[in-house]
Amino acid sequence: MINREPKALWGRAIGWSYDLPHVDEVPAPRFSVGDIKPPPNYIDEVYLELPRSSIILRGVIALISIPLLMFQIGLMLWMYWDLFSGDWSHDWLTNVLGFLVPIVSLWAIIPFAKLDLVLPRDEPIRFNRLRRKIYFYQYRYHYIYLFSRKHWGVKPVAYNWDDVTAEVHRIYAPGHGGVIENVKLSVRNPETNEVIDRVEFASNLYKGEAYWAIARLFMQQGPEALPTFVHPPRDWNDDDGLSHMHCLAPKVHWPVAIDLESRTAPSEGETL
């Protein structure tokens, strides 16, 4: 059952349409998720790992933005040479725009090229059913602070499974069939009901619904509730079968502490 009634959550994002079933809602009769591609990365009695990617076509943005970036640099050098060679006959507004527009243009292009080159080849999500936690291999980035190590890089986070909501977002985009539907996971503060984080889950509705059904089945009933997947799991750190751009992308390396926690059951006496 799809919940199309908005909950009292603070911080609904632009484009929110409706929520997928709640984490504790009894799963509907199993629909076909066995042929989902790519399938889960890993499944055992403790945790499930689902693949995820923020970029659908790896390398396309870089192939477009890098030549555009080179052209923009050449244009900037030409404009600055013309500007500082003594041709200050224009009014002050024209001179200011001539100085700032190339810089702003570069600043608008660089983030897309950089993101396509430095984003990990996979951004997996782990669901630990014994700890009732969800772990995001999250890559954070910022369009303003382009060269800040604080704002760019892998920063894995963990949240309680009960605080997660799957949201369907719709964005109208001419040239893409009129509408794009994707699924995001929002995390709320259980005390205030305020959304404290929101991350990409799936780039399309079919994959998002299938992955969310798989996660809920696993967390509620365990691995035995999952179907036999048609496609075999893959190791995204293995270059075999990956595109050249994927092979150039950084591999997945979980920090030791969160890697161990996300793959194991809580020890006796451990506080969750």
Image (cartoon, rainbow, N blue to C red):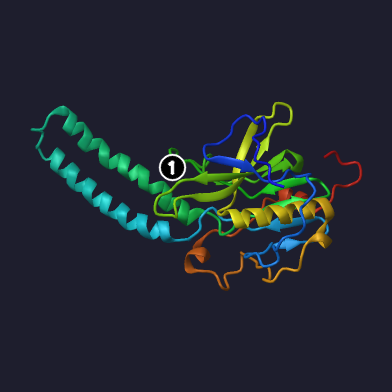
Residue 3 percent coordinates (x, y): 68, 42
Instruction: Give the residue displayed 65% in from the left and 68% down from the top.
Output: 234
Dividing the picture into quarters, in which one does residue 185 lie? Answer: top right
Q: Which of 186 and 227 is in front in this view?
A: 227
Dividing the picture into quarters, in which one does residue 218 lie? Answer: bottom right
Instruction: Give the residue displayed 62% in from the left and 57% down from the top.
Output: 207
Q: Quadrant of the C terminus?
A: top right
Residue 259 percent coordinates (x, y): 72, 52
Q: Which residue lies furthest to the bottom in this view?
A: 240
Instruction: Give the residue displayed 67% in from the left and 46% down from the top.
Output: 20
Q: Nearer the viewer, residue 201 or 248?
A: 201
Dividing the picture into quarters, in which one does residue 161 lie? Answer: top right
Give the residue number, with chain letter if any, for mark 1: 146
Q: Position of 240 compared to 86: left or right?
A: right
Residue 229 percent coordinates (x, y): 72, 68
Q: Residue furthest top?
A: 192
Q: How many labels does the image show?
A: 1
Q: Which of 201 and 180 is in front in this view?
A: 180
Q: Residues within 10 Å of mark 1 (few under 14, many from 20)?
A: some
Q: Nearer the viewer, residue 167 or 83?
A: 167
Q: Residue furthest right?
A: 268
- Element type where label 1 sits in the image: loop
Residue 184 percent coordinates (x, y): 60, 45
| Amino acid of disc 1 | Leu
Q: Position of 27 compared to 171: left or right?
A: right
Q: Position of 16 compared to 158: left or right?
A: left
Instruction: Give the residue displayed 81% in from the left and 60% down from the top.
Output: 225
